[in-house]
Image: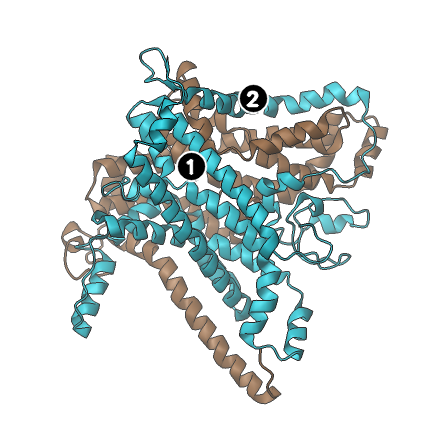
Amino acid sequence: MTTRTAVDGRAAFDARNLLIHAALIFGSVVMLLPFGWMLATSLKAPPQIFTYPPTLIPNPVVWQNYVDTVRAMPFGRFYLNSLFVAVSVTTLQILTASLSAFAFARLRYRGREALFLVYLATLMIPFQVTMIPNFILIRYLRWYDTFYALIVPTAFSAFAVFLLRQYFRGIPVELDEAARMDGASSLRIWARVIMPLSGPVLAALTIFVFLGSWNDFLWPLVVTNSNATRTIPVGLASFQGQFNTDWHLLMAGSVIALLPVLLVYILAQKRFVEGITLSGMGGR
Amino acid sequence: MGVRQTPHPHGNHKVRAEGAADVAPYSGHTTFAHRAKPKLPLQAHMTAQTASVSQQTSVSRWRRYRPDQQWEAYLFLLPSFAGFLIFVAIPVIASLALSFFDWNLLSPPEFVGVKNYVQLLTSDRVFRKVLFNTFYFTVTIVPLQLAFGLLLAVALNRAVRGIEIYRLIYFMPVVTTIVAAALVFQWFFNRDFGILAAAIWELGAKTGLPIRPPDWLNDPDWAKPAVVVLTLWKNTGFTMVIYLAALQGVPRELYDAAKVDGASGWQSFRYVTFPMVSPTTFFLMVIQMIGAFQLFSEAFVMTRGGPAQATLTIVFYIYQMAFEFSRMGKGAAVAWVLFIFIFLFTFIQTRLQRRWVHYEAGGES
C-alpha cells in the first residue's frame, strides 16, 4: 500500500499477488494432505503401509480393503442410522423453533420478553452440564440404545429460536396484518406467510443442524451400545476399537464416513459455508 | 434479518452485528426483493451468547399485547418450552443437585455435601492435570486459530482470483467428521510409518542435523501439540470465512484514506483492518474459548486422553467419571466446574472488550 508511481506499482502488485497465491496454495496442500493420506492408505496393501519410507501412491491399488471394511462393520447401517437421526432432529428442531420464534416475533402477549430472556439464558448452558441427568432420564425411560435417545433430547434448540426470531422480525408486519384481515389464523400465517418468506434462513439452519447432528459424537457415544443404533462417528470409533492397527481398514472406514458429506459439500459449497457461518456457534 | 451485515443500498456501512440492538429492527424501507435474497448473511448471529446481555427490545413498534393471543402464543411455545424444561432446565438443576451426592446408579444415592467439590479442588491430582491441559489447549488453540484465520482471510481478500476454490479447500475440514479426522491424524503422527515422521527423518538425513521425530502420541510432551495441530486444521477454515466476511465489510474509503496519508501496508493493517474487524475477533475469541474448554472428541479418538493423562480434558474427565467409573455425582460436579469456568471467562472477556474492541461511532460498547 505504499505510494508509488502507477507503473512500478503495478509490477509490485503482480509480484505480491504471486506471493500470496504461493502461500495460499501451500496452505491448500496442507489442508488437503490428510485427505490424500487417508485415501492413499485406504487403497494400499498392508505390506506397503508398513514400509519405510512411506510412499503416497498405492501400488497395487487394493479396492478389496473397502469390501473388507464393509464386511467387518455395517457401515450401510450406520449411514441409515445417521440419516434417520439427522433428518428427524433437523425437522423437529426447525418445527419447534419456528413455532416459538413466530410467537416471539409476531404474537402479542404478556410475559413475552421475560420468556424470551429465559430462552436466551439456556444458550449459555453447555451441553455437558445437562448430559449426566439426561443420560439418567434416558435410562429411566428405557430409551437407552434407541433412536428416541438420539433424537428427542436434541430436538430443541434455543439458538434456532433466536436465529429465526431475528429473521421473522424483518418480514414486514403488514403482510400478516393483511392476512389476518382476510381471516387467516395465526397458524395459517405461520405456514403461509412467514415460513415461505424465510427460505434463506431456513436453508442455512437446515444445513447447520443437519451437519451438527450428522457429526455429533459425545451424546451418541453415551447413549448407544449396539450397531443397530450407532451413527457414523460412533460406528467409526468402535471400528477403531476393534481394528486398532489395521490402518488400511481404518482409513477405508474414514473415507466411507466422509464421502457423502464431502460430496454434498463440494456440490453445494456456497450454501454450506453460508449455512454454517450464519448459524456458527457449534462448528466442531 | 439482523444478520445482514454487508453494506446494503439503503444503509450506512453497518458492518457488524454484535448485539441484538443492531441485529434486527425492521426498517420500513427494506424492499421485499431485497429480503428475498439476502447477501451472505454471515456472522451476525454473532452472539447468541454474548447478545443476551444487550438483548433489549428496543423496538417500540410492538403494539400492546392482545388478550386473545395470550393462549394462542402459549400453544405455539409449548413444544419447545416443554422440550427445554425436560431436557435443559430440569437437568441443569438436577446436575447441580447430583453433584452433592455419590451415586453409581446401582445403590441408592448418598448425600455427601460438598465433598465432591472439595476433593476436586484439594486432593484430586488428576483433576489438576485436567485443568492444566484444558488451559494449555485454550491458550494455544485460540490465539493460533485467530492468527491463522485472519492471515488467511487477508490473503484471500487480496488474492482476487480463486477465492471460491481456496475457500472450498480451507473450509473442507470444517464439515469433516471429527472422528475420521482424528483417525487420519493419528496415522499421520505415527512414529514408524507416518508421513510426518518420515519427512523429519529425511530432513535430518539430508542436512546432517541431529533431528529425529518425537514419538508424538506416546510422549506426554508431544501429544498435546498433536491435538492442537488437529484442532487448528479442523477449525481454521471457519475462522477464516468469518473474518473474510468481516473484511469485505470494511469500507474501501478507509484504505484509500490511509494510503493518502502515506500509511504502509503494515500500518493500514494495524490501524484500519485490525480495529475494523476487532468485534469479529472478539466474537471468535469467545466462541473458540468456549469450544476449547469443551474439547473432547479430538483427544478421545486420537490419544484416549493419554499418554499419562497428558491430553485428558475437562469434558473427557466428565465422561470418564460418569460413564467409565459410574460416579455420577463427581461427574456432575466436574460439569458444574466447567460451567462456572465458561461463565466466568465469557464474563471477563465481555468486560475486557471495551479496552480493545472498536465499534463504529454510535455503536454500543
Image vertical order of residue B235 relative to residue A29, above or below: above
Image vertical order of residue B57 relative to residue B284, above or below: above
Q: What's under tag 2, amino acid-wise?
A: Leu
- The hue of chain B in the figure is cyan
Q: Position of residue B128 (x, y in %)?
A: 32, 38
Point 44% across, 47% down: residue: B175
In terms of image quadrants, where is residue B68?
top right
Q: What's under tag 1, amino acid-wise?
A: Asp
Residue named by callout 1: A216
Report the front residue among B244 and B104: B104
Q: Quadrant of the image for the C terminus of chain A?
A: top left
Label 2 resides on the chain identified as B
Total numbered circles: 2
Report the front residue among A49 and B77: B77
Residue named by callout 2: B85
Report the front residue among A181 and A242: A242
Q: Secondary structure at mark 2?
A: helix
